[in-house]
Amino acid sequence: MPNGFGYEYDVFVSYAHADNEKPLGSVAEHGWVTTLAHNLNTGPGHYHKNLFIDHQLKPGDPFSDDLFKKVEHSTLLLLLLSQNYIDSPWCGDELEHFIRTHSNDSNKLADVFVVELLPFETFSNVPANIQNLRKRLIHAQFWHQLADSSAPILGGDPSPQECSPESGRHYWLKLRELRNAIDSRLRSLHPNKPSVSVAAQVDDSHSASLPRNTKESLGTILLADTTEDLVAQRDAVKARLEPEGIVVLPEGDYVGLTAEEFKTELASDLAKSQLFVQLLSTTVGRTGKGFAAPLPQLQFDQAVSAKLPIMQWCERLPGSVEIPDSQHARLFETAFLRAINRTAFEQEVIARLQAMQRAAKAKQVEDAASPAQAATKKLIFVDDVAGQKDLNDKLRVWLRSANCDVRGLPPKAALDSNGIDLVQVLKPCRAGITVFADSAKLETVYNRLIFFLNQIAESRLPVSRWGVYVTPDTVGCDLGLISDDVLTITEEQLSEFVNGLEQ
């Protein structure tokens, strides 16, 4: 019976039978692959799919004409990539026949879905068609690496019920990603077919923690490929951001690309993104053949060249001797790095995109009202009392990324001297920030701040608020000022301070 696309089956599951063997002692009713195929047809709101999975073909058996017809008569091909798959003589035949009968173009395989059971880099003797297929077509990596493990493992192995809690969480997360990708493709091909729900025998606690994305689009980010020790962290960040309406690129990853392909693909993804987000660890990562540097460094450098706003995260700041590679160590010295709880970092990414969206909407309103006025950014005066170059550079970089221009005084310039007209300096500014990082300079900070506030009041300047930017060393200092227009702000409160200028 045709499925509405002119095909007999929605999905042909292409796998190595060695990956579906049930271990002795396991209480699972079926092997890992059969369980996965069944679970693709479970879950709230899933698209009910007619899947074909062959359980008869054994090693050494010839690939029959009947199986070729089933491949030809399937809308999608789901390929479970492993070393066993690569070593299997007939798995490559299924792929070749699907390409030949569906697109005849190995570079345009919208209807092939690839699942990695173990890291691609661990495979040997990979044929050319798989090498080509690997580029940007991975829809789910079911492998992950535990913190106390020296090698990656398959999530949900030997079964979702018998694996560790961490492995189980990874399995259900990846299952959802894969199911949604397949269902989305089938719905796009046949939008009028009703979705059929089937009672799902899955752990509801996992499903409840993976909400469907129903929110308005918040923007697009490039979530950089990570080293292997951070794959699980990256997956968790992606799972947190997507339900907020955030599109996360790349759709697959950049592993397997040549140096030129990588540069082109990354540039394309950066052009689609509003923000570059990178997770870092002390692990340097491998340098691909023909690549000038490891992947973390290359992605960061290209994001800087693209002038894209950047946010970086690490669990903790490493010591000076923990990273022998000087280029990788540079990534921990940028003004974009936050060493905080990952959950808090995820919220900061969301808040950053929300602020960017508000700014974009405000700009649209301004463009409609006054195109000339809309072209201007928010101008903020920064008084560098701290004298700490790294801190001030970091603050200025952040303000520029938040669509602000910065104005200040020349180094060591005395007030009311050097021919500087402070009123003219402050006149176009929307706000001011005094950098207070040394408690020994409390009196200096106070005197300068009073001077600025008096100039604003006497000349009736349109400066709407002033922030005193404090650090852990000065956060407890009392300046003796109580005013709704003078706010004490920390690094974490910068976004709120700047966003308040738009109200």
Image (cartoon, rainbow, N blue to C red):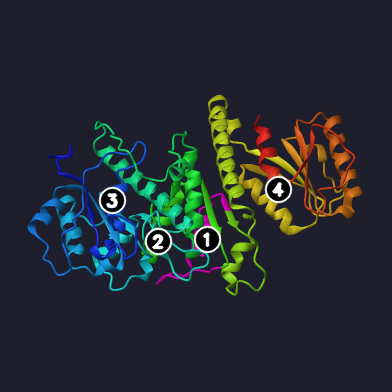
Dividing the picture into quadrants, the one containing residue 14 is: bottom left
User: Is residue 391 highlighted in magenta?
Assistant: no
Nearer to the camera, 418 or 312: 312
Q: Residues within 10 Å of mark 1 (few under 14, many from 20)?
A: few
Amino acid type indicated by mark 3: Ala
Q: Is residue 451 above or below residue 112?
A: above
Which sits earlier in the primary sequence, circle 4 or circle 2?
A: 2
Under mark 4, the amino acid is Glu
The quadrant the N terminus occupies is: top left
CA gap, disc 4 and disc 2: 35 Å
Q: Amino acid at mark 2?
A: Phe
Distance between mark 4 and mark 3 Cα atoms: 48 Å
The residue labelled by disc 3 is: 37
Spot occupied by residue 107 in the image (x, y as percentages of width and height): 26, 56
Q: Quadrant of residue 460?
A: top right
The stretch of residues the image draws in magenta is 283-311
Q: Disc 3, disc 1: CB below 8 Å? A: no
Residue labelled with disc 4: 491
Residue 452, placed above or below residue 322? above
Q: Earlier in the sequence, mark 3 or mark 2?
A: 3
Which residue, given by chain and number where applicable, does mark 2 sit on?
262
Residue bearing mark 1: 301
Q: Residue 373, image x and y in percent? A: 61, 31
Secondary structure under the numbered disc 2 in the rendered image: helix
Q: Nearer the viewer, mark 4 or mark 2?
A: 4
> What number of labels is visible?
4
Q: Amino acid at mark 1?
A: Asp
Looking at this view, is 334 or 22 the one in front?
A: 22
